[in-house]
Amino acid sequence: MMKKRFEPYMYMAPAVLIIAFIIIFPLIYTLYISFASKLIGREITSFGFFNYAKVFSEGRFFSSFGKSLFFTVISVFMKFVIGLALALILNRSFRGRGLVKGYFFLPWCIPWFTTAILFLWMFRFSGGVNTMLTRAGLSPVFWLSERLALVTGIFANIWKGFPFFMISFLAGLQAIPKELYEAAKVDGAGPFQQFLHVTLPGLRNVILITCTLSTLWTFGLFDLLYVMTRGGPGDASKVLPILVYETGIRQYEFGKAAAMAVLTLPVVLLLVFVLVRLTRREA
Amino acid sequence: MKNRGGVTRTVVLLVIGLVVALPIYWAFVVSFTPPAVVLFKKPLYPSPFTLENYVALFAGEWGPGSGYSFLLPVRNSIIVAVGNTLLSVTVGILAAYALAMMQFRGKRALSTFVLFAYVFPPFIIMIALRYLITWLGINDTLYGLILLHCVITVPYCTWMLRAYFLSVPKDIEEAAMVDGCTRFQALIRVILPVTLPGVITAATFAFTLSWQDLILALITLDTDVNYTVPMALVNMIQGDFIQWGKLMAGAVVGALPPIFVYYLLQRHIVSGLTAGAVKG
């Protein structure tokens, strides 16, 4: 009898212990070193808010925060629009639909590092886009300049990310009962009104969950911009994950990097909270 | 009226289709054309067509002064991704089985705990993870990277397999146990065969997540003997002179395993994506 009662916990134990050991414990440790004056090779001598004071006085963190928000909001919005448009088009049956679906699925299958290298080639000054522009008699553009690097990164992010939205929305659309459309038609609703009153409400939860998930992933995305620009030129595309990496791992300012991570935590926790609530409602 | 809608749809599909194709097309141009031709003539298609970039990548050195062929990072990536997949799928199956099919106190809290871990962005704990593997003495080893990739793959596998196991009728398990199976035997003999597509999908995702990770590899690995594919490629992008032919060849080779497995399992992937991520 005793064994039966503890059985579920024994099945849970490996996963819970691993997650506790490599996510929860590091999270607590991050909090701890954000208050400590630890430099490489030296023991902790004192505790206090000096790491936070440094982060606040430099202002670099806040400009990175702004870039991260800009990167995330524009990317997610565009992925949403393109994903929804394609899902609506692909939800009707036509010849070659499966093929078209498989084709638009392709960017999602390509790893981040390859995506980054493809777009680095496309948008560097003597790269693909400028080659095509000059062949067409137009003048080349500095796509990875201080002014445009972040926007170019957003473009690459949309390219790789929209299929996820498309596929989620397609699955969501297929779950909407056909009778609802029939009923709406009987009530005299046109295509736009059907979209507004049947499609959107039917997709509501899928839209909310997909957007929240993508917001979290886009906000935490490191690989793409790191490979394309290393956060440059200057600080032009230095989103938060790159800033934390540079500060903590490259410049050995562990405490300051930890403080930056802790200051980002409320945003992350808020999004996770929203997602958990949404998932519970769905279940 | 109807026709106009059709035209709009076709135009949208063609424009987005073209944008999807262009970067991929250019990858083939750059990787199948001799580097000097790409640099000076800027061709729009591979002429003359050559395999020399791929040959140089595998027969020569992948990076400036590295002294190793690209086979080495490919081998390292396979070791890490396979090791991590075996570990996280095993752990994930056990936990998902409990979460989906057993009744116990704290189940709801543990589900939320796993979901939290699944969506938590690893960059927040990057510094502490560096401490952790150094403390364990497995920094700069493939073991260290196998462990750190669990940050992503263990919660993912657990969460996704939970959704799969939830779709299995409870009676199947109960019937097996009435027949004298223990819980564990019921899992191995009855549940796993039924949920095999789900397990394969979870394994595929775990493999590709591990295969394409860069940030955890950057934290873990220091010497180029241990570099994985993304690490090796990032190290080819240094300074002003980039060997584009080799780099692009490496990027194409590195993208092949994920593309291959995704298309092989496409039907399951779509349901896996939505079951794991969207339907909770």
Image: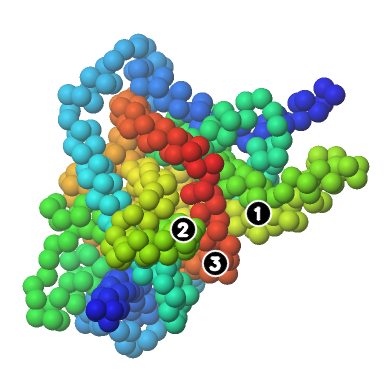
Left or right of residue A29, residue B98 in this image: right
Q: Residue at x 69, y 54 (%)?
A: B195
The answer for how far apart the CA atoms under marks 3 and 1 are is 14 Å
Q: Which residue is mark 3?
A: B266
Considering the numbered disc 3 on the image, is that residue within a helix, a strand or a loop? helix
**In the image, farthest residue toward the front:** A187
Q: Nearer the viewer, residue A225 or B74?
A: A225
Viewport quadrant of the N terminus of chain B: bottom left
Q: Which residue is mark 1?
A: B199
The answer for how far apart the CA atoms under marks 3 and 2 are is 23 Å
Left or right of residue A277, residue A242 in this image: left
Q: Which residue is mark 2?
A: A176
Q: Nearer the viewer, residue A210 or A205?
A: A205
Q: Chain of mark 2?
A: A
Q: Nearer the viewer, residue B103 or A186?
A: A186
Residues at marks 1 and 2 on the same chain: no
Indicate which label's residue lies in the foreground, 3 or 2: 2
How many numbered marks does the figure carry? 3
Q: Nearer the viewer, residue B215 or B63?
A: B215
Considering the numbered disc 1 on the image, is that residue within a helix, a strand or a loop? helix
* Position of residue B76 measured from the top left corner of the image (x, y, whole percent): 55, 55
Left or right of residue A256, residue B66 in this image: right
Please tell me how crowded label 1 is: few (under 14), some (14-19), or many (20+) other residues with Cα within 10 Å: many
Please tell me how crowded label 2 is: few (under 14), some (14-19), or many (20+) other residues with Cα within 10 Å: some
